[in-house]
Image (cartoon, rainbow, N blue to C red):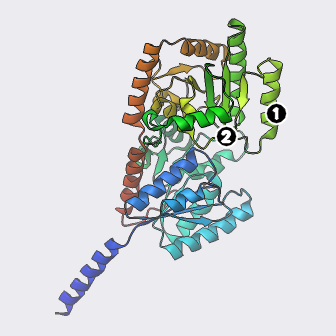
Amino acid sequence: MAESTAAAESSITGALSKLRRPVVLQVLPSLATGGVERGTVDIAAALVEAGWKAIVASSGGPMVREVERAGASHITLPLASKNPFSMHANTGRLAELIGASGVDIVHARSRAPAWSAYFAARRMKRHFLTTFHGTYSLGLPGKRWYNSVMARGERVIAGSNFIAEHVAAIYGVPSERLRVIPRGIDLDAFDPGRVASGRIIQLAQAWRLPDGVPVIMLPGRLTRWKGHTVLIEALSRLCQRQPGRPLRCLFVGADQGRHAYRQELEDRARRLELTDVVQIVDECRDMPAALMLADVVVSASTDPEAFGRVAVEAQAMGKPVIATAHGGARETVIDTVTGLLTPPGDAGALADMLERALALTTAERETLGERAIDNARRNFDKRQMCDRTLDVYRELLDHRDLIEGPAPA
């Protein structure tokens, strides 16, 4: 009798434990604008929708409101700091948060907070996984070791096959721990049929765009590797070939404190007599409407993009996109079918592609646009990204014995 009672109690306890909502903690430096931040918000919302509990820890930023609107919790911690003492202190803070909130999985998305999260997860014996968002430089002594925390997850999510191959080659992550999950975009927002004309007109007026002038757009924060200088040089060559042709190029993105680089771009445009062509319009909160203003969208990154969200968003809006032929762009843009690829850092080749894109007939633009939209919708829906990420979480939770992952090198 006692044995049957104990068995029944054990069964009830097991059933009740399964009713508890799994808890996932995502950690990143801050919640400013960017692809890492957008993916974090998307996953937090998907977790809440699936009935899980979602927590995001960062140093804060404007996207905190989006996390909280999605029904997730945000905890403000100094996770943007790379100071070793702060990182050590953050380990204790995160361990306390993990224990108090019953966190099951810690998902790290950037190196400095990942180190704190890694040791906190080990201390509390919780699952730890990472998303490898970039190639990360290896030049300075110790950088490979510093970067290696992103390869220490029980599972390592890569946003493209390019990143997966890089992680396997440089950090020795075996295929059984790697999961390739392309980044997804909100196809309800990036739908040309859902952008009201008033939103487009409002931006055109705010940016003082003249009617009938072709618009070339490079979205992305003002940082050197995004290739703004390459595009300026390409524009100079294009204007030399077609003197007097009206043209406007918009750099849509904040400098995030890189004032010297912004000044450099403005000075270069002035020297090349492109003051009336190149315009920096800072950050835009309505990118679907902004993309509707573009005749050509450019991703001129000189370093390979881990994924390349701009190229996918432009395709979703049916716009001709020119991207550099390396990194994730080779997986998101089908050359001459859904967009055009050009060698990185080659201003002459970029000028050729700009000339080609601007010369497309209406029928050619429509055909290219239809193919681009189909590519984005079939392969880069954020719902696919969220579903596949939650599958990785479930995969970890199915392992009853916690895997502690590789020991520190």
Q: Residues within 10 Å of mark 1 (few under 14, many from 20)?
A: few
In the rendered image, is residue 154 in sight?
Answer: no
Query: Residue 91: x percent and y percent?
Result: 63, 67
Amino acid type indicated by mark 2:
Leu
Q: Which residue is mark 2?
A: 138
Residue located at (43% from left, 19% from top): 366
Asked whether 304 or 406 is in front, the reply is 304
The residue furthest bottom is 1
Q: Quadrant of the N terminus?
A: bottom left
Question: How far is mark 1 from mark 2, CA to CA?
Answer: 29 Å
Residue located at (46% from left, 33% from top): 192
Name the image quarter holding residue 3. Answer: bottom left
- Reply above or below: 317 against 56: above
Query: Residue 160: x percent and y percent?
Result: 48, 37
Query: Residue 98: x percent and y percent?
Result: 53, 70
- Reply above or below: 337 against 109: above
Q: In the image, which is nearer the foreground, mark 1 or mark 2?
A: 1
